[in-house]
Amino acid sequence: MNSGVGWLRAVRLATLFLSLALGLGLIIGYPAEAVAITAVALLGYSLYQLRRLHHWLQHPEEETPDAMGVWGGVFDRMHAVQRENREAQGRLRSSVSYLRDSLGSMRDAAIMVDRDGFIQWSNKAAERLLGLRYPQDGGQALLNLVRMPDFKRYFLGGDFSSPAVVHPEAGEERQFEVEISRFGDGDRLVFVRDVTARARLEQTRRDFVANVSHELRTPLTVIMGYLSTILSQSDELSPRFTKALQQMDQQASRMEALLKDLLWLSRIESVRQDPLEERVNMCGLLEELRDEIHSSHPERKLVLELATKQLVNGDYRQLHSAASNLVQNALKYSAPDGAVTITWQESDGQPVLTVKDEGIGIDNVHLPRLTERFYRVDDSRSTATGGTGLGLAIVKHVVASHDAELSIHSQFGRGSAFSIRFPRAESPVTAASAGNSGL
Ligand code: ADP
């Protein structure tokens, strides 16, 4: 019923009753009393219906009261609203249980945690992987029940932009990958999956590459030894042979460099990601690198600019190899008289290493794939420069294991700049890394 029309009818009816009462009252000589009695009766009727409504709202399971006029309309509307609510609730309940069923059937552990870190819900896999039982453990603090230090660090760190790999216990082979996403009012959905098999496979691949590289080194050393002995007596050989032997020697040296890079790459890949505790004095490291390059390429122009004394939490050998690869590339891919500048400076409070050259540059289409193993912009040029194709892959690994960021700016034909932005070293340090000239 249209509520506006219902109200009008009710007002009209009340007016009619009151007018009738007034008419009757005039006839019998008591108009005011008759109107008053009728008004009280109308009020009583309304109060009675209000009481019925109140009672029914408190006991919605009881039958909807029947009434005439506007009160009938009110009861019908309330009944319809209640039914719609019940239906909406039912639909919501079934989607929630559908969602829970789908999360529950996952092989990965799924845990819902509120903004204060208390468990709201967890699936069956969470019991198998983490020992969490639902509903028994509902409402408990997640970190009280999952005590893996790596997990705790990631959970409290708040940066969930990429998943974390955690080890349930120190020295244990098992590995879990944890992903956390935020939803609602600071609530979090935690996914944990067992990636031990995948990690084992990766390790097997790394071991294989490392073993093959290692095994190939011995025969190669023997071949190179003989080649250099024969070449040292090249006066006795015909020029044709000498040229062939020189090429063999050149290729053997390339192969040696390749094996060295492969071995180094598999070593830095398999080092477990422990917090980097060594504080590396980058100024000393870069000075050492500059001196090394000076002695091997005295003719090249190498500029070192040290604008900050910031240290880096990291591994000295890895950092040296990354910086060295960048500088070697800058030299390789520039004209012999092109300058190479190494800068160590602070930007937005973070230390940044930049290696800049005025060389051939790189077309932007190559930049996204540049750090892949064996990716080369131009095969013939790289072969001519003697590159292994692993230099930037090594740099990428070192950058990742130091929580740093690599950025490459290059213009074809005008030069390149490779920058590594490191996180700030955690605390000011007294002892710099060994083997460096102090500042
Ligand atoms: P490579 O041993 O071939 O130098 P890298 O992984 O070090 O392998 O580099 C990959 C490719 O990136 C190189 O082949 C080269 O084409 C390009 N490159 C790297 N550094 C520079 C640079 N400073 N200037 C121009 N091109 C570069």
Image (cartoon, rainbow, N blue to C red):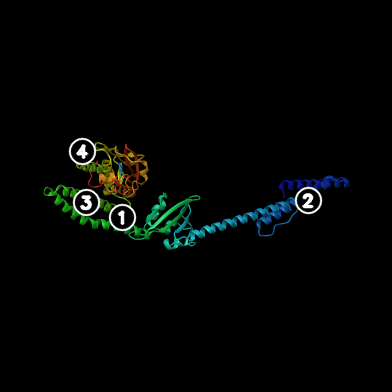
Mark 2 or mark 4, earlier in chain: 2
Quarter that holds the C terminus: top left
Q: Kindly tell me whether residue 430 is visible in this rendering.
A: no
**Mark 2 Cα-neighbour bin, 10 Å: few <14, some 14–19, many ≥20:** few
Q: Amino acid at mark 3?
A: Ala
Q: Nearer the viewer, residue 163 or 121?
A: 163
Q: Nearer the viewer, mark 1 or mark 3?
A: 3
Mark 2 CB within 8 Å of ligand 1:
no
In the rendered image, which quarter is residue 409 located in? top left
Q: Amino acid at mark 1?
A: Ser
- Residue 364 location (% of width, % of height): 36, 41
How many numbered discs, if any? 4
Q: Which residue in the protein does label 2 denote? A: 41
Q: Which residue in the protein does label 1 denote? A: 270
Residue drawn at (20%, 57%), measured in percent from left and top? Answer: 219
Q: Nearer the viewer, residue 68 or 289?
A: 289
In the rendered image, which quarter is residue 417 located in? top left
In the rendered image, which quarter is residue 175 located in? bottom left
Mark 1 or mark 4, earlier in chain: 1
Q: Which residue in the protein does label 4 denote? A: 299
Q: Amino acid at mark 2?
A: Ala
- Look at the numbered discs 2 and 3 and tell me whether their residues touch, using CB distance below 8 Å: no
**Mark 1 Cα-neighbour bin, 10 Å: few <14, some 14–19, many ≥20:** few
- Residue 143 location (% of width, % of height): 42, 56
Residue at the far left: name it: 236
Q: Between marks 2 and 4, how big is the CA–CA gap?
A: 114 Å
Q: Nearer the viewer, residue 386 or 316?
A: 386
Q: Kindly tell me whether residue 340 is visible in this rendering.
A: yes
Q: Which residue in the protein does label 3 denote? A: 252
**SS under mark 4:** loop
Q: Nearer the viewer, mark 2 or mark 3?
A: 3
Mark 3 or mark 4, earlier in chain: 3
